[in-house]
Image (cartoon, rainbow, N blue to C red):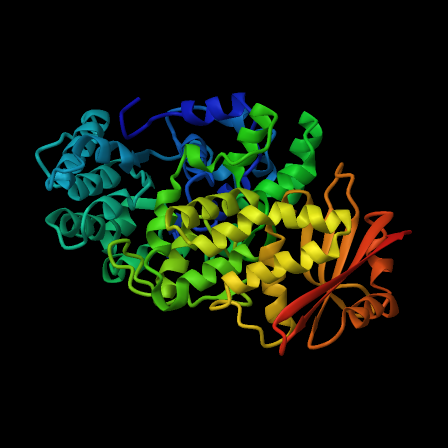
Amino acid sequence: MGLYIDKGNMGFREARRGEYVDKSGLIRVINGTLGTEYKYSCVSRARRFGKSMAAKMLVAYYDRSCDSRELFQDLEIASDPSFEEHLNKYPVIYLDMTRFISLYKNDPTIISHIKEELTEDIAGTFSNAVPYNGEDLMRYLQLIAAATGERFIFIIDEWDAICREFDPKTKAMDDYVDWLRNMFKGQEATDVFAGVYMTGILPIKKYDTQSALNNFREYSMVEPRKMASFFGFTHDEVLALAQKHGMDFSELEKWYDGYQMGAQSSMFNPNSVMEAISSEWCESYWGRTASYDTVATYIKMNYEGLEDDIISMLAGQRVTVDVTNFLNDLHEVTSRDDVLTVLIHLGYLSYDRVKRQCYLPNREVSLEMEKAVRKNNWKPVIGAIETSERLLDALLRGDAEAVARGVETVHQENVSLFKYNDENSMACVISLAFYSARNDFHVHREYQTGRGYADLVLIPRKNVTKPAVVIELKYDNTVDTAISQIKQQHYPDKVAEYSGEMLLVGISYNRKAKTHTCQIEHLNI
């Protein structure tokens, strides 16, 4: 067993000893690329989304130095026709780039250290078959492949760690790009590698190294392709975990669901789900592996109204984003779209590729965004968040006057952002005003009821003994009209399946008087 080659299956074996969710279907996808023009794969996803776990699984499956059959025999991949063909058949080179960052973070010759250590380790393994005589690493690999007939699997975990730590204009970055080009381009690479798998946070092309690495097929938080289901935990996977461990699935859903990965519309943060199951408690585990300072730094830039977009997302809105122009260089974030795209790749936002919109996916991430807003001292928003619990309490008590005053205060403090033009702009204010409702309710904007769409509906979460709430908004109209519409369109009928108790709420805004009025009716179904 070497440091970088023939490492065996211990990493994945340890994972199998604990709670493990089967993601071995990833192997089937990679097997389909081996020995083809698509054998170069770069899979980028946010921290806490299982990058290293996937890399260890691939090492265990392909590594010729061990027998991993029992580790996979009860997993999905075992029934795939390609399973036997590639199981433990390759010399596997595995690099974790964060190791070199920790050792040589400020050393401009870091790439020389990587090549030296890697060459020494490989030579120690193959010296009997092919003596090492000082050749360049790639040349030595060619000699090995020619002499033994074997082709390598090369796996790099956190490949972009160097790109994140070193300025793109430094010698270290130039050396890194040159080395990657030398390793993975041209006929030499075809002769040496059966497959290459790299994982990181950001896609390759966004570092402006496409001329060096344009032969890689990329799978990312923005475009996961056929790997979407392997990027996080699916609805069914988390439901099974919740049932196995006696956890409340609705709580796990509230805290960690909401990511959209390609065709997968309900994806959970895997690390946080496992932390919650281990501790038997749902809360934000984000801060244990990342800092809200990251998002605070980016949103403070406030390019082109970025602050307004963040506030809108806190209010439950989605915002349009163009993810195509970002160079993916963390040292060069120059626009609103750049910031939003970075936050998508870092897992702070989810991305709807069809609608080209981003949004806050769940309670855990919303709390991190709250911290960033507080750090940037956005006082009106902080005030709205802090008073939202009192406003919700007034709503549930049926205090219509207090609700009207509270909504009016939120509107006045954020009037530069939420300029009333219609009921939709009113809905943004109402969503922000009732921000804390997300703790106990599923909050739905434009909720389809069968005969129309209710402006805002709050459906109590499982085990929450509070009434459902149907809110109808009117602009330059009366609250009586709002309540009548709720009844005439039979909005309560659809909501009644979730709760036998309900509040019908009409909120109206008078443009001339610039005042809000509210009416609340209690309904038992």
Whether 250 is drawn above or below 5: the answer is below
Whether 289 is drawn above or below 493: the answer is above
Look at the image and tell me whether residue 196 can be seen. Answer: no
Write the residue at 42% across / 68% down.
322
Q: Position of residue 500 (x, y in %)?
A: 87, 47
Outermost residue, left side: 134
Determine whether, in the image, residue 167 is placed left or right of residue 11.
left
Outermost residue, right side: 525
Determine whether, in the image, residue 343 is placed left or right of residue 204.
right
Q: Position of residue 16 (x, y in %)?
A: 52, 25
Determine whether, in the image, residue 219 is placed left or right of residue 487.
left
Q: How many marks?
A: 0
Depth check: give the residue in front, 286 or 215.
286
Write the residue at 28% across / 53% down.
330
Q: Position of residue 260 (x, y in %)?
A: 56, 54
Among the 4 quarters of the image, the one containing residue 476: bottom right
Look at the image and tell me whether residue 454 can be seen. Answer: yes
Depth check: give the residue in front, 305 or 283.
305
Whether 340 is drawn above or below 498: the answer is below
Q: Image quadrant for the N terminus?
A: top left
Determine whether, in the image, residue 517 is placed left or right of residue 186.
right
Depth check: give the residue in front, 111 or 171.
171
Whether 400 is drawn above or below 139: the answer is below
Among the 4 quarters of the image, the one containing residue 64: top left
Write the residue at 30% across / 62% down.
327
Among the 4 quarters of the image, the one containing residue 214: bottom left
Depth check: give the residue in front, 106 or 348.
348
Q: Position of residue 374 (x, y in %)?
A: 42, 47
